[in-house]
Image: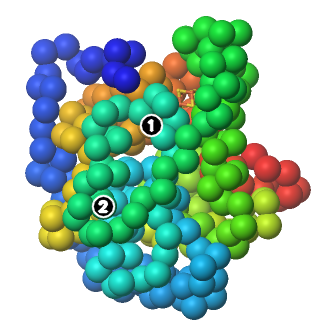
Amino acid sequence: MSGEVSSLPFGDAPTHASAIELYARKSAGFDERLAQTVELLKQAVAEHGAGLIQSTSLGAEDMVITDLIARHALPIDIATLDTGALHDETLALVPAIEARYGLKVEVFTPVQQAVIQFVKTNGERAMYESLDLRKACCAVRKLEPLSRMLAGRSAWITGLRREQSSNRAEVPFAEDDGKGRIKLNVLAAWSWADVWHYIAANDVPFNALHDQFMPSIGCAPCTRAIAVGEDFRAGRWWWEDEAAKECGLHATKDKTGVPA
Ligand code: SF4
């Protein structure tokens, strides 16, 4: 599904540029951050065993984590969500991971009848009409299948990084997900340059859309390319206020314990 994706927002600018050339830089402290991440993954295996899962969005950060899981032969299950609205380039990473690493990626999909009913009631473009409808779409296509993915698990690994947005500036390495599980953000301290340095150095497969100015990739109707100088997540739900830009997958507790 790609018909809704907006074109580049800066006129005659190029539509393709190598993400590796644009972003990959080895900065001070990279080796220490990498070693720390490997240690966090090993600790998570020791603490959670079969209760641990990597929930991959198939984004650049998650591809780094999958590579680390494979490289260190860590017994961690890997799963992703196919919302039914992803780009073909994103879905192509599932067989790419399986071919490259020999690891199975379990794919969770929404309840088809619920999607059909949502679209029938609210239309194909409901996400653009109101924040409530956008969140309702995310609930049907993402949150419900995520709850099945995480059922019976005690911990899940994500690719959240502090640098990704102001909403994520204080992401800890480990946090309560509000549902009795631990969420492990093993790349919390990594920079975007770190992520791409690792990808380049280890020839990690990545989404071809990263070479089309899309650093953060979600569903096709809700992702666009960003312009030079725009915020990392400016291409996600770009019609909404910054404060609203999360889909609920990474709701955290505020100081009152209420999921935000
Ligand atoms: S990101 Fe967009 S298309 Fe995907 S589930 Fe949320 S509102 Fe629906």
Query: Would residue 190 be visible to someone looking at this image?
Result: no
x 49%, y 75%: residue: 76
Residue nearer the viewer, 82 or 218 = 82
Spatial distance from mark 1 to mark 2, Cα to Cα?
21 Å
Query: Would residue 55 be visible to someone looking at this image?
Result: yes
Residue nearer the viewer, 93 or 33 = 93
Give neighbour class at mark 1: few <14, some 14-19, many 20+ (Cα, 10 Å).
many
Residue type at the position of mark 1 = Gly
Disc number placed over residue 98 in the picture, else none:
2
What x and y, as percent, mark residue 143?
A: 67, 42
Helix, strand or loop at label 2? It is helix
x 48%, y 87%: residue: 42
Give neighbour class at mark 2: few <14, some 14-19, many 20+ (Cα, 10 Å).
few
What x and y, as percent, mark residue 244?
A: 64, 33
* Res. 11 image quadrant: top left
Apparent side of residue 210 relative to residue 115 in the rendered image (left or right): left
What x and y, as percent, mark residue 236?
A: 46, 32
User: Can you tell me whether the CB of the residue at mark 1 lies under 8 Å from the nearest atom of ligand 1?
Assistant: yes
x 18%, y 70%: residue: 202
What x and y, as percent, mark residue 48?
A: 63, 82
Query: Which residue matches tag 1?
Result: 218
Relative height, residue 193 to residue 12 (above, below): below
Relative height, residue 115 to residue 153 (above, below): above
Rendered-image quarter of ligand 1: top right
x 39%, y 51%: residue: 58
Helix, strand or loop at label 1? It is loop
Residue type at the position of mark 2 = Glu
User: Can you tell me whether the CB of the residue at mark 2 lies under 8 Å from the nearest atom of ligand 1?
Assistant: no
* Res. 183 image quadrant: bottom right
Apparent side of residue 69 relative to residue 201 in the rendered image (left or right): right
Q: Earlier in the sequence, mark 1 or mark 2?
A: 2
* Quadrant occupied by the N terminus: top left
